[in-house]
Amino acid sequence: MNDATGDVLLLVDDLPQSLGALAQELEADGYTVLVAHSGEAALQRLDLVTPDAILLDALMPGLSGFETCRRIKAQAAWSHIPVIFMTGLSETPHIVAGFDAGGVDYVVKPVRAQEVLARLATHVRNARAVRLAREAVDVGGHGVLVIDARGRVAWQSPQAQRWLAESFADAPAGAGARWLVEAGGPGGGGDALADATTQRLLRRPAADGRHLVARWLGEVGLGESMWLLSQQAAGEAQPSRLASAALTPRETEVLSWIAKGKTNRDVADILGMSPRTVNKHLEHVFEKLGVETRAAAAALASRELG
């Protein structure tokens, strides 16, 4: 039985009667199954309810499954929904097209109910964890996104997606990602504000006088880079290095004592932790501040903490 009883599944197929047995299996496993007969009908359904997953026929009259998926992924409110393609096509180009459109998985017709159930359970669970993580990121008033090795957005929080859409509303698709890659990537120029460290900070003015501020957080995978986005009001002072570093309360405590000239052992005694733990906190501090030495971190903290 499905652990997440009550999960909603949207089944999209121009011949849904051919999937009657599958729908029965899904309902028996605890899913609430909604049906749409076309890509257009699926998008209309999504205006009324947000399912936990979508099983989507790749080839349909009118709006194809691939184009339907692209439209779903282009909407911030729907982009987190895992889409699993169903089709009789099993050639590599078709499978690649499904993943390029934003699908997370691919099953070949005739579909096997137990296989679909197993895949659904995994993708629904993963999508829920990602959605919660994305929403948690946005709570702090920031947005986060990851750019892949090909200069495309690999992952973004809802806030980051909204801000990029607003800032590049009149620009071609993908302009926001190109701005980050061309202006702020390693060796980038443009309006990047680079200091003597590896930090890169970009600012893009908006029509209302605010600025979209993007701070490079570093490499997070093979060719992937992470950016922290925020909005700066007109006339508002540029955030300090320390303020934009997003240190945890414990990291801030450790840094403040280091800035006062305390050794790792002194800090460990004061905060009730081991010197090894203090060193681990400092490693994170160095990475977030974009510095390489204890002296550089202490000097920065002394200037900004006073």
Image (cartoon, grey):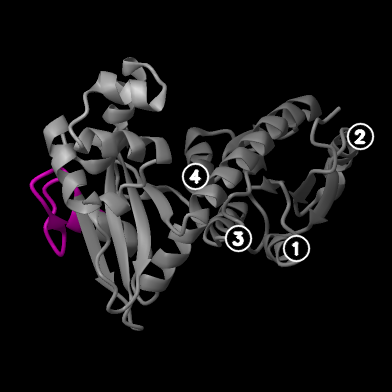
What span is colored magenta in the figure?
181-199
Task: Tell me if residue 186 is in the magenta stretch.
Answer: yes
Of the numbered discs 2 and 4, the one sitting upstream in the chain is: 2
Residue 151 vertical position relative to residue 158 in the rendered view, above or below = above
Q: Main secondary structure of the magenta part?
A: loop
Task: Name the residue tied to disc 3.
Answer: 77
Name which quarter of the figure residue 207 lies in.
Answer: bottom left
The residue depicted at 76 percent of the width and 30 percent of the height is 117
Badge 2 is on which residue?
28
Looking at numbered disc 4 in the image, what kind of residue is underneath it? Ala
216 lies above or below 104: below
Q: In percent of the image, x 59 and y 46: which residue is there?
A: 131
Residue 127 image position (x, y, % from top left): 62, 41
Q: Is residue 145 magenta?
A: no
Residue 37: % across, % down: 78, 58
CA gap, disc 3 to disc 2? Answer: 28 Å
Tell whether label 3 touches label 4 (CB within 8 Å).
Answer: no
Compared with residue 78, is residue 277 higher up or lower down, i.e. above or below?
above
Residue assigned mark 4: 97
Mark 2 or mark 1, earlier in chain: 2
> Circle 2 — which element?
helix
- Determine the image quadrant of residue 184: bottom left
Between disc 3 and disc 1, whose residue precedes? 1
